[in-house]
Image (cartoon, grey):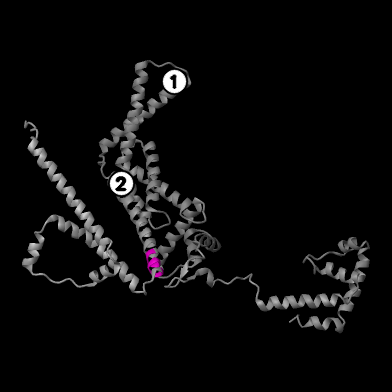
């Protein structure tokens, strides 16, 4: 072993002198940079704008071998000269637009943020695949061994639970052994799960692009894998992957039926929609054209009206804010007619009609005008019966009928009706 040697006093002196020289050089460099920064802006601008002369190769070699302190001072001064020169050029040139630069920077930040989100999602998938790839695959014998350990753990857990419910006192060694078997079963379950996570990924890839994120599909498939591990029966003789595939697919398809659509559709109806789509694709290949509702109904053994109803359920909603066109300056909602919108001509005509009608009613007595307004709902839009009007005025319905008949005769007179006939067209 090499022994450590203590430095002598002379070596300490040399080291101290070297350190002091380095500090002095750094101070000189700092003063040089400070003096350069404090130079007038105009002078620095001229120096920055002056083209550099091409020195001979020999002179450049000598310059490269100059004192290190001077080189550090020049390097420290160069950024300051560039910064001051840029400020001087910006001050002298007056056509620089900060608004355009800020707008471009904002757009660049938005794009960078969007790219970062996509990159983060891709990185998450990549990291997950790398993690699950570290676990080796299992053969049939290893799957059976793990399944036996899981079964033993479940039996031991049930035995402990029964003993606790019955207040049965188990021997200390037996209780310790049962708990160890329970933990061993949990370890075997986790091992079987981790070794088959790649199976979930391979099945989840088939359902991408249908309204759910890839990581969400993997998560739902993992829930199905857990269910498969809990119900796997190794005594049947088939591989675990064959059994687990059904549970994984069911978990993914159920999750898509519940979460992929904006408007949730019951699972059984989603299965009918998928069946209709599959038959429609098969008939399209056989017939060379789109099948009719009657042909689809015959294949599915349902009525054509039921086919049309299923197709209505299968329609996906579209956002009214969806952009239209290459430039993206229009939205889908801008091209949809508002059936409840009032046309300006109709609004003006209705206002004039109200004014004319009010003028005509003012030529009648107060009771006659009130009966007409209540009878035809001119005030609140709710027509009244003769009995209701009679209760308002404290007379019989027959009297109200007579007043109504007399008033309508007056309104039919050309002196009153002529101004209203123009609005009938």
The quadrant holding residue 339 is: bottom right
| Prevalent SS, magenta region | helix
Q: Is residue 75 left or right of residue 124?
A: left
Q: Is residue 222 left or right of residue 3?
A: right
Visible residue check, residue 144: yes
The x, y position of residue 98, in whole percent, is 39, 68
Magenta extent: 99-105
The quadrant holding residue 230 is: top left
Magenta segment includes 421: no
The x, y position of residue 341, in whole percent, is 63, 71
Give the residue number, with chain letter if any, for mark 2: 198
Visible residue check, residue 239: no
Q: Nearer the viewer, residue 301 or 137?
A: 137
Question: What residue appears at the point 69 percent right and 75 percent down from the top-left corner?
Answer: 347
Residue 163, labelled with which disc?
1
**Is 354 located above or below residue 304 in the figure?**
below
């Amino acid at each position: 072993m090499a022994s450590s040697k203590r430095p002598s006093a002379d070596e300490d002196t040399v080291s101290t002198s070297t350190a002091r020289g380095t500090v002095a050089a750094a101070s000189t460099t700092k003063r040089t940079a400070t003096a350069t920064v404090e130079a007038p802006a105009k002078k620095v601008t001229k120096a920055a704008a002056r083209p550099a002369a091409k020195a001979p190769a020999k002179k450049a070699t000598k310059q490269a071998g100059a004192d290190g302190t001077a080189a550090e001072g020049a390097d420290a001064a160069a950024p300051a000269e560039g910064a001051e020169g840029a400020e001087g050029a910006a001050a002298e040139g007056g056509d620089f637009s900060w608004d355009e630069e800020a707008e471009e920077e904002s757009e660049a930040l938005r794009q960078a943020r969007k790219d970062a989100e996509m990159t983060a999602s891709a990185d998450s998938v990549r990291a997950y695949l790398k993690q699950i790839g570290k676990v080796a695959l299992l053969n049939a014998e290893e799957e059976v061994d793990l399944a036996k350990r899981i079964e033993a753990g479940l039996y031991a857990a049930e035995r402990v639970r029964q003993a606790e419910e019955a207040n049965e006192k188990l021997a200390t060694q037996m209780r310790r052994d049962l708990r160890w078997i329970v933990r061993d079963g949990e370890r075997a379950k986790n091992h079987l799960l981790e070794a088959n996570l790649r199976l979930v990924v391979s099945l989840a890839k088939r359902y991408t692009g249908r309204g759910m994120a890839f990581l969400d599909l993997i998560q739902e498939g993992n829930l199905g894998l857990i269910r498969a591990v809990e119900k796997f029966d190794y005594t049947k003789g088939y591989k675990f992957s064959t059994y687990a595939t059904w549970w994984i697919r069911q978990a993914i398809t159920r999750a898509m039926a519940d979460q992929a659509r904006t408007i949730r559709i019951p699972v059984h109806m989603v299965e009918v929609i998928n069946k209709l789509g599959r038959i429609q694709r098969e008939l399209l290949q056989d017939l060379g054209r789109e099948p009719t509702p009657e042909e689809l109904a015959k294949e599915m053994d349902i009525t054509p009206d039921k086919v049309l109803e299923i197709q209505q359920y299968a329609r996906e909603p579209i956002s009214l804010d969806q952009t239209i066109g290459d430039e993206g300056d229009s939205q889908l909602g801008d091209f949809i007619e508002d059936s409840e919108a009032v046309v300006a001509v109709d609004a003006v005509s209705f206002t004039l009609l109200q004014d004319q009608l009010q003028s005509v009613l003012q030529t009648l007595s107060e009771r006659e005008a009130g009966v007409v307004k209540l009878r035809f709902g001119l005030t609140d839009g709710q027509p009244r019966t003769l009995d209701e009007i009679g209760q308002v005025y404290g007379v019989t319905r027959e009297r109200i009928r007579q007043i109504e008949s007399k008033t309508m005769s007056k309104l039919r007179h050309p002196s009153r009706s002529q101004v209203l006939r123009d609005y009938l067209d």
